[in-house]
Structures are given as structure tokens and as C-alpha cells.
Image (cartoon, rainbow, N blue to C red):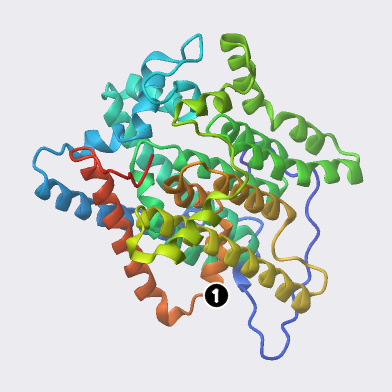
Amino acid sequence: MTGLIDAPSSPPPDAAPARVAPGRIALDATAEHPTRTPLTARVRPLLRPAAYFVLSRVALLGAALVAAAMFPRLRVVRTMGTVWDGTWYLKIAQHGYPDHLFNEGDGSRWGFFPGFPAAVRALAEVTRLSLPDAAVVAAFAFGLTSALAIWLAVREVFGARLADRAVLLYVFCPTAYVLSLGYTEGLFLTAAALCLFALSRRYWMTAALCAGVAGLTRNAGMVVILAVLVTAVPAAWRGREWRPALAALTAPLGLAAFMAYGWARVGTPVAFLAAERFWQGQHFVWFVVPIRALIVTLRHGPRGVALVNDAMAGAALILGLAGIWLLDRMSRRVRMVGGTTAAVPASWWAYTAGALLIAYSAYFTDSIPRYTMAAFPLFVAFAWKLPRSMEGAVVGVLACLQGALFVAVLTSAVHPLPIPFLP
């Protein structure tokens, strides 16, 4: 997949094939890619991750039919575009942002970034769809592109076989139902994964532009910017090259533009942070919420008032830490096998750690699991360790959990839950 926007400033050196120690298995011999291949040969490997995503959406369609049968008043497609935060994105798509910060009914439009609403508005203008329908179509499209982008990023570092398995876990992850709602996850993960892919290829300006899109999509865009900086700045310093230096300067422009817009409209460059107080006094809590949720779950068990939300937040904490440990093991294994080559690039570490820290700083426990999904390199770690004999069973369980959560979210539009799964 070459020629995205800019070519590498200098061709990467040919890597000597890694020697595999006795008793060890190489991660994936397909990590090497040919210099020139026909277009059809480049596109064909993408069919498998695309099929995984479509299959996961078909499974969710079955769950949606169950919800519609349970509640005949439920309008499935409209609910998918308007449920919870989807309403705020549609307000931005229709009316833009207000000229001052105020409580617009347990929240504020300034708490959300403009990237996804702008895409929804553009799609509605072109297709003449209603805004809720356009949000659903955009969510599906960005969910598909996120699966393809993650596959490309993982394939570039670990090879096609591990990329296939990582995308399989990603699309069937229980919280991946948000890829079918009017939410930002699909667009953000598309930009983030393409950025890491471009950094691996040294497509500096492509990576910078992807970081700009991520910065316009959600506050976690700052960790995508960080991934560009930790790669581009050393490259510019060592090679005295202008492309990585320009990428480092360009990457923050999306986030900076939104901050400047907020400053001009409401008098503060961090309007998206100031607006959080309108959600029940929400604020930055320094990573303590998932720890507290895990303790509450272990202490109260089934008697807990918010058992499901606390258990999911605690599980997100445990899985995040376990994924970091597995990523470190992957790096150590390749270093031992192949000398000084590290399996996990610095940009991946910066992005993964930053995404987890932002996820664990959420004020509401029910937001933490889906925020954690942004740290997609964790799926690579679990795919690397998952035995092939258990792959089908694990995916089946994940699909059932995803369907159950999707039904709960849809039906909450008809019968609001006392403790929501998704704020």
C-alpha cells in the first residue's frame, strides 16, 4: 500500500531475516512486503478484515431484530443514530456550537469535537439522508475503515496472520457495538491506526494529517499527536531532514484549530474540558475510577448497585494492564530472537499508554470500557497469545456479549435504564 500522500524521505534499509532460536516460533514471516505488486494483489488481503467487520455487523443486526421484537415501538435505525451521545453529535451537525458555555440539558455541545458531526453533515448534504440515518451510514463506513486501518498498521509491524486475528478480536469486542452507533470510535480509530501505519512507512505528512483528523475527533487525539512527535522529532534530529520536522509541526494543527475556535467563541481554549462540569460535575479524576470500580465489584459482588458497569470498568483495567504486559513480552521475545530489533515501535507504546491513561481517567465507569477500545494494540497482544484452538469459542463468547450490550443500549431508548451502559 504505497503512495498515500508522500513517499518516505529515504528508503528504509533492507532488514536481514531474523534468526529464530530453537523452540521459538517467528511472529509472522509475512511481515516483509514486496516493493511492487499489482493493485488487485494489494487489495485482496483487505478482504478478510472487511469480511470480519461485515460479519460482526450482521450479528448485531440479529441482535437489533431481537430488540425490535421485544419492543415494537423501537425504531432501530433512528435509535442507532440518536442514542446517548449521538444526540449531541446531531445537534452539532445541525446547529454548530453555541457562542457561550451553558447547560443545554445535562450537557453541552462544547464537550464534543467537530470531526464526526462534520462528516455526518457532509454525508447528509450529499445523499439527502436525514441526519440520524447519515450518522448510522457514517458509523458503518468508519467502522469498516477502522478495521482496514488497524489491519494495515498491524500487518506492517507483525505480519498479515496476526493482523487478521487482531481485527477479528477488535470487531467482535463487546464494546465494538459502538461502531454501529452515531459515535466517534470508527473515525478516531481510522485516523489513529492509519497514523501508526504511515509512521511505520515513514510517510511523514500522511501521519501528520491523520493526527490532525484525530485531534478534530476527540480529546484522545492528543496521544496520536504524541505518537507522531516521538517518531518524527528524533528522525528529524538524526537525519537533519525537513519532512519529519514538518510533520511534527503539522500534527497538532487539528486540535489547535478546535482550541482556537473555542477560545474565539467562548473565551477558553479548553472549552471541551470546561463543558464536562455540566454532566453531573464530571471532571478529570486521575485514573482512580476503574480501580475503585474493581474494588467495589470484588467487595460487594452480585449485591453491588452498579454491578455490570463496575465489573466492566474493572475488567477494562485488568485487560489493559495484561495487554501492556503481553506487548512487553512480544518486544522482549523479538529482541532475543532478532538481535536489536524491537517488535513494538515507540509510537505504538506512546499511543497505547496514552490511550489507556485517558480511558482510565473517565469520570463515569460505563465510559471506561469503550474508551479502552481505542488502545487497539492490545488486541494484537491478545491475538498473539490466544491459542488457535480457542479462537472460535472466544469470538463466539465476545459476539454474544456484544449483542447483549447492543440490545441493552437500544432498548434503553424505549425504557431508560436506571444505570446506563453508555453515557
Q: Amino acid at mark 1?
A: Lys
Please provide percent x and percent y for residue 175.
40, 53
Please provide percent x and percent y for residue 402.
33, 57
Q: Which residue is mark 1?
A: 385
Does residue 91 appear to the left or right of 359 in the view shown?
A: left
Give the residue displayed 56% in from the left and 54% down from the top: 152
Which of the two residues, 110 or 308, is positioned nearer the viewer here? Answer: 308
Q: What secondary structure is marked by label 1?
A: helix
Give the residue displayed 84% in from the left and 45% down from the top: 235
Which of the two residues, 72 or 136, is positioned nearer the viewer here? Answer: 72
Which of the two residues, 153 or 174, is positioned nearer the viewer here? Answer: 174
Position of residue 261 relative to residue 361, above or below, is above
Which image quadrant is residue 37 in? bottom right
Q: Quadrant of the C terminus?
A: top left
For residue 412, say whether it is visible.
Answer: yes
Residue with the most extreme bottom position: 22
Position of residue 113 relative to residue 347, above or below, is above
Position of residue 25 relative to residue 210, above or below, is below
